[in-house]
Image: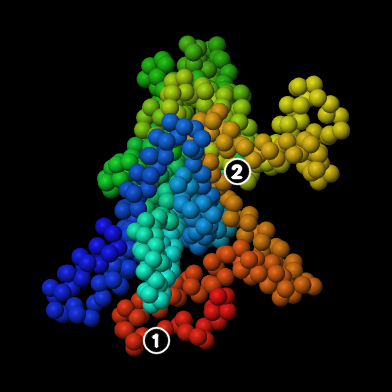
Amino acid sequence: MSYTKEIETLSSKIADLRTWGAIDAESAVRMRLQNRFNSGLDIARYTAGIMRQDMADYDADTSKYTQSLGCWHGFIGQQKLISIKKHFGDTSKRYLYLSGWMVAALRSEFGPLPDQSMHEKTSVAALIGELYNFLKQADAWELNHLFRDLDAAREAGDSAKEAEIISKIDNFKTHIVPIIADIDAGFGNAEATYLLAKKMIEAGACCIQIENQVSDEKQCGHQDGKVTVPHADFLAKINAVRYAFLELGVDDGVIVARTDSLGAGLTKQIAVTNEPGDLGDQYNAFLDGDEIGSADDIQNGDVVIKQNGKLVKPKRLASGLFQFKAGSGFDRVVLDCVTSLQNGADLLWIETEKPHVGQIAEMVNAIREQVPDAKLVYNNSPSFNWTLNFRQQVFDAWAEEGKDVSAYNRDGLMSADYDDTDLAKEADQRVRTFQADAAREAGVFHHLITLPTYHTAALSTDNLAKGYFGAEGMLAYVAGVQRREIREGIATVKHQDMAGSNIGDDHKEYFAGEAALKAGGKDNTMNQFG
């Protein structure tokens, strides 16, 4: 329904109710439009539809991949979406990512923690709710400016401008976008996973990412010591998430199944198997062990399994964990991915040790032999040294082509001495096109950076502290922050407005008319910014 029609409809209702005489229909419609989503479930259903359509668009055209940036506070997520709308006009194909790593490091009541699922599980759902509260406030903020512009056009008698602004209101595009939310390894058993998934969905999550590590042994995907679980355990948690979506009426909810098998050489348990070749047997076939010839080869506490028709004693560490065979990671990844997609997952996440299109494509091609439409969410992780990795990739490619690379030290390519070389420029070009290349060649539907604002906050704070507490003094803030905000049109330069001061003033006027005590008068220093 159009803005004008909404006002007409509500005006008619108000006219029928004599006690509502103080209510202005247009003001009420404005408030209604500024809050288009009444619950997290409304958001989850809306964004699930967006994500499903984006997946279909990608299947038809791999250039239509999606992207997101990780964030650890609602304000950070809000400013990302405001910037996206400012620079690109709409939010199409652009999401937010909620990183368990950043929740652990920045949101835990215990203080900074490593990415080992030690933080409060409810803090994940709380951050989803916070992010959407800030995105809804961005809607209210942008519409509030349109409403004020509309009032100014009417006051000036500019009917053409009035019509233009009403058209913008009618065609307003929300800041609400899908969030891919990290549930780690489920924070417990399948029931615990289900309960937390419900909280996340109720907060607005349309997409939940879950990994196949042991919950109480969980490690960051780019650290050592990762321990995976048998497929039956992982599939039970995928089922738990799906039931949570269906129970809450988010039938299009998306599940991302992450495998850490490429870098995980350990398992906590031997899989249950009922017959040769079943899923448990396939999992156990990767266990490293020694063939035994007789009972004399079995020591106290040893475990013996049948592997490929032979009795084998799996290698067990002092921790009680079992080892996988060296070099088996690739095949375990393919089995994990195929099994997940065939049992309820929608998308895959393969944690790799470097950003290499060829490596990703090799695994995806093997998966697609069994699941042709397999698609990935890929972590463009700050844990990778992107500069060094891509310079080494170019070095290796040039060497293979027979080019002279004697001027370069492969192990020292991170040096600033190489920054202006042809090799460095070629490497940067490959970094620039990495996402498009991986979308086209390696089945990557969604590219994300998990921890960008962790790093940008540290970098900008370092620059400000260096100047402010040094010789620059206040100029460090004025030239390095505020003046740039003004020149680059960053809305936060008017921080009172960004925090909702003008929205509150307008509400006061709706509620109390001329008696309203407003903050935005002539003495408000925000007016200095025009």
Image marks 1 and 2: residues in contact by CB distance under 8 Å: no
Q: Quadrant of residue 448?
A: top right
SS at mark 2 in the image: loop
Q: Which residue is mark 1?
A: 517
Q: Which residue is mark 2?
A: 381
Disc 1 marks which amino acid? Answer: Leu
In-front residue for pair 437/334: 437
Which residue is located at x 70 percent, y 40 percent?
428
Residue 82 in view, yes or no: yes
Disc 2 marks which amino acid? Answer: Ser
In-front residue for pair 406/84: 84
Q: Nearer the viewer, mark 1 or mark 2?
A: 1
Image coordinates for residue 232, horizontal then vertical, percent:
39, 30
Q: Is residue 284 left or right of residue 346?
A: right
Q: Is residue 441 above or below residue 175?
A: above
Q: Residue furthest bottom?
A: 515
Q: Is residue 130 left or right of residue 264?
A: left
SS at mark 1 in the image: loop
Q: Residue furthest right?
A: 407
Image coordinates for residue 403, horizontal then vertical, percent:
81, 24
The circle on residue 73 is none
Crowding near pointer 1: few (<14 within 10 Å), some, many (20+)?
few
Which residue is located at x 57 percent, y 24 percent?
362
In-front residue for pair 296/146: 146
Q: Quadrant of the N terminus?
A: bottom left
